[in-house]
Amino acid sequence: MTDILRRKAALRERVSGWKRAGEVVGVVPTMGALHAGHLSLVEAAKAACDRVIVTIFVNPRQFNNASDLENYPRTEEQDAEKLAPFGVDVIYVPDPDQIYPEGFATTVSVAGLTEGLCGAHRPGHFDGVTTVVSKLFLQTGADRAYFGEKDYQQLQVVTRMATDLDIPVEVIGCPTVREADGLALSSRNLLLPPEARAAAPALNRAMRGMADKLMAGAEIATLRPLAKAEIVAAGFDEVEYLELRAAEGLAPLPKAERPARLLAAAWIGGVRLIDNIPVG
Ligand code: PAF
């Protein structure tokens, strides 16, 4: 079994040995409840780095809802078992005081990119993400960090943050992994009641239909009401947002006039799902 480290001093000692030997270190930051999407990031890291660290930390500061934090799946033992075949070098599961020591008073905040989409519906979420991710970058000293495109806004925000703060890490986005029926893999899928799980692929299905029409020149404002109605008719309770944004910088777009991304968040069976697909 892979070594599990819980203290940043032990992690630093391990990493400094690797760095002295000139090795390239990759990190895959996670909140655990690992699925094939996370494992694809581990695979990408293993293929490009000499050493790979997987971090597991359910970060309370990025939850804007107490019951969401409480219900978030915590499966450390199974996570370690899933990672075993990949030969990662360290699983870093920091004790809470290693991330938020007593008196912790700093927030890392990215403006602009965080203001719409999930940022508009989950106040404080991205501040929590950028605060913890900056700490994980600094504690691991990683040269490369791997994130899923499934959290597309997060990927953009973390890339901006690392650039702005001169953190010497290359942020690498990896494609979303999906179930055969199109549902994007997410730790939250574990929380879906069976009926909701069966209906959940309707979100991606509707988005793919929209993408085809956007590619043919349709306007998002025309397509949105019909697509929302289709998603709700399939069993979703609410579509939080369904937006067309520039693939780089996330500016709102009326039409797919340059490389774009269609992004959505919707609620089903008490679970909030997000998805995004490229358009053009
Ligand atoms: O994507 C996630 O799982 C989390 O937001 C991250 C990047 C591990 C930060 O807590």
Image (cartoon, rainbow, N blue to C red):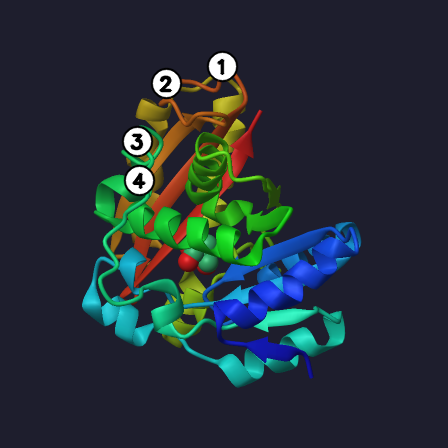
Ranked by sequence position, the earlier of labels 2 and 4 is 4
Q: Secondary structure at mark 2?
A: loop
Residue 254, labelled with which disc?
Answer: 2
Instruction: Give amino acid for label 1.
Output: Glu
Instruction: Give amino acid for label 2.
Output: Pro
CA gap, disc 3 and disc 4:
6 Å
Q: Secondary structure at mark 4?
A: loop
Q: Quadrant of the N terminus?
A: bottom right
Residue 209, labelled with which disc?
Answer: none
Q: Nearer the viewer, residue 143 or 249?
A: 143
Tag 3 residue: 111
Label 1 packing within 10 angstroms: few (<14), some (14-19), many (20+): few
Label 4 packing within 10 angstroms: few (<14), some (14-19), many (20+): some
Asked if the residues shown at circle 1 and circle 4 are in contact, with their CB atoms under 8 angstroms apart, the answer is: no
224 horizontally vs 47: left or right: left
CA gap, disc 2 and disc 4:
28 Å
Tag 1 residue: 257
Whether residue 276 is visible:
yes
Tag 4 residue: 109
Q: Residue at x 31, y 56 (%)?
A: 62
